[in-house]
Image (cartoon, rainbow, N blue to C red):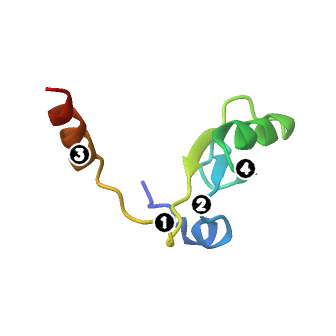
Amino acid sequence: MKPIDRRPVQRKYPGKWVAFDKDRMTVKGVGGTPMEANEEAKKAGIKLPILFRVPDPNDPAIFIGSIWNEISLRRV
């Protein structure tokens, strides 16, 4: 299987939710939430789109493991 180059999508839609067609290449919907992207894809005739959140290079990195460990320790 050939790798898919998503760099053009990352440059065009940073921080957005993207709905792909079954070929995993064609963007059929874009939105600020997965529901918005899904709705656009449905309007384009896609029954079951593949949803993907494009990372925003300006978003800070979050380490979920550390956050959950802190929360669980506080509850004890």
Q: Position of residue 73 (x, y in %)?
A: 15, 35
Please tell me which of labels 4 and 1 falls first in the chain.
4
Residue positioned 73% across, 29% down in the render: 47
Amino acid at the residue labelled 1:
Asp
**Which residue does the image show at 60% across and 40% down from the upper left?**
50
Mark 2, secondary structure of its residue: loop
Residue on which the image places disc 2:
15
Q: CA distance from mark 4 to mark 1?
A: 17 Å
Foreground disc of the pair 4, 1: 1
Residue 19 vs residue 54, the one in the foreground? 54
Q: CA distance from mark 2 to mark 4?
A: 9 Å
42 left or right of 50 in image: right
Secondary structure of the residue carrying tag 3 is: helix
Q: Is residue 3 left or right of residue 41?
A: left
Q: Which residue is mark 4?
A: 31
Give the numbered dot on residue 23.
none
Q: Is residue 64 above or below residue 15?
A: above
Residue position marked by numbered label 3 in the rendering: 65
Q: CA distance from mark 3 to mark 2?
A: 22 Å
Residue 16 image point, x, y percent: 64, 56
Residue count near mark 4 (Cα–Cα under 10 Å), binned few <14, some 14–19, many ≥20: some
**Pointer 1: what residue?**
59
Secondary structure type for disc 1: loop
Element under label 4? strand
Q: Earlier in the sequence, mark 1 or mark 3?
A: 1
> Residue type at mark 4?
Gly
Q: Nearer the viewer, mark 1 or mark 2?
A: 1
